[in-house]
Image (tube, helix red, strand yellow):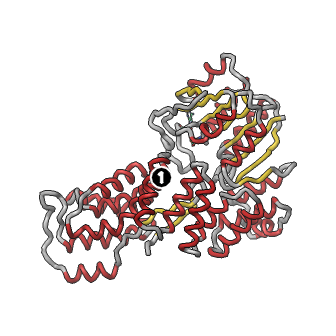
Amino acid sequence: MRGFRHQHTSDLSASLTCSTMAFDIDYLENQVDVVNDVPRRADVNGQELSVSVKLLIMKLLVKALLSKSNFDAAISMADELLQDAPNSVYPHYALGTAFSKIGDNNKAVYHCRRFLEIEPIACDLKFKQDNLATVYNNLAVSLKTLGFLDQAEIEFKQALALDDQFAAAYNNYGNLLNDKARLPEARHCFMRAIEINPEDHIAYWNLHATSNEMSEAQSIIEACISKSPTDEIAIFTLAGLRACSGDERAFNELLEYGFSNEPLVRSIEWVLSLPKMPEIHFNRWSIYDRAIALSDSQRAFYEFGVWMGDSFSYIVPSFATGFGFDSFQGLPEDWGVVPRGTYSSRGRVPDIENSKFIVGEFANTLPAFFADNQPMAGLINFDADLYSSTITALTNARPVIDKNTTLVFDEFIVNNNWEQDEFKALNEFCEIYGFKYDVVAISLFTKQVVCRLR
Ligand SMILES: C[S@@+](CC[C@H](N)C(=O)[O-])C[C@H]1O[C@@H](n2cnc3c(N)ncnc32)[C@H](O)[C@@H]1O
């Protein structure tokens, strides 16, 4: 059985990069003990290392990879191995996994692809065969994180064609399908992951985000917690959902036990403090559907932060026209732990019907654009994450915003410093222009909030 660690990622969906090689550590130790020949350099193809050296290094790599904090060590060891054996599958396997674990997905994609391309020498065939499905899965996870959803889908399908018992790949493929607004298929994948591994609490967690109904979502999270009683994100969320449904007992206990500083708990407290309880949603598509239903479809749709155009292409068909603003170079500054440049589409601008894209830094493009007469906004999606970008977008777009504009904020709550991001920008904007706002809908899982001004 593959070993893997799962984690709640920045979007709270949990993806699984498999990190244990299909090797047994005792087996390795035995091999190193029995093979004691003098190390040889790589052959002309750069593939052949002495068996003992290869196994010894791989043993160390396995150890390093298994320890969460040792990915840097694993990378430098694997890099050294690569110098000696550039066409060996082993270092590419290790580097693909380790780079994916530390979030350098471009490098992870490169090494996973090299692993898949290399025709291994005879003694490496079994290693490649044994790890093929894992590498397709890891490649797909990295492609998904980089925003290449169609390519990621192809690789997930390869992983599952090779191994139809690969629960982690079903789980990850489910997250991808959720990202592609294909919720029934996503649901099917999570159910399949649970069927294969009934203890897979992460698949339950992800499954709840395909729900459109409060009681169903709560039951699924209860199942998740029954499999993993210490999953804090699930525990806080369930307590929050119960509180939003009128039973605040579990949530008050969390406050009493000292969890009031947790960002998710602070977010729930904010929701509970609102004058009217907003609708609770569980995925971005139902949030968008609700926002669209509230909006005047004769007006224009605006989006600040387009990236690959996923949310834009979902929303714009409901409106007369759409305007998207983005540098297409990624975040202009670090955003908490998310480095500058993340979400770059490397300048690639989407081509979507009835839509116009205004390319460049908001501070450079918005003043001139909104100085001209522009159509009033029916719906605006603020998805540029940063406080600085959001306040620039809000203040420049002021001429097209009124009380009939629906505002969607994509990263409003739940993040570590959410009060300093889009939340702060909206409150500042309202203060400057004398607005108040009603919160119509929220989603804890996707961190989104839908507002209307008054
Ligand atoms: C999270 S992504 C947008 C995601 C997109 N809405 C989707 O559906 O996947 C954030 C985008 O905001 C853009 N962005 C952030 N701040 C910006 C700024 N000040 N000027 C231009 N683009 C900016 C980045 O280039 C990036 O493409």
The spot of residue 78 in percent (x, y) is: 30, 61
Q: Among all residues in the image, which is located at the extreme top? A: 372
The spot of residue 52 in percent (x, y) is: 20, 74
* Quarter of the displayed picture in which ligand 1 can be seen: top right
Where on the picture, by quarter, is residue 397?
Answer: top right
Left or right side of 6 for 398: right
- For disc 1, the neighbor class at 10 Å (few under 14, some 14 to 19, many from 20) is many
Left or right side of 189 for 72: left
Image point 71% across, 70% down: which residue? 222
Three-letter amino acid code at the position of disc 1: Glu
In this rendering, the answer to whether 206 lies above or below 11 is below
In this rendering, the answer to whether 328 lies above or below 42 is above
Q: Which residue is at the front of the view, 60 or 164?
A: 164
The spot of residue 339 in percent (x, y) is: 50, 46
Which residue is denoted by mark 1 in the rendering?
A: 153
The spot of residue 323 in percent (x, y) is: 62, 28
Q: Secondary structure at mark 1?
A: helix
In this rendering, the answer to whether 48 lies above or below 360 is below
Q: Which residue is at the front of the view, 61 or 121?
A: 121
Where on the picture, by quarter, is residue 398?
Answer: top right
Image point 81% across, 35% down: which residue? 453
Left or right side of 42 for 415: right
* Quadrant where the N terminus is found in the figure: bottom left
Where on the picture, by quarter, is residue 75?
Answer: bottom left
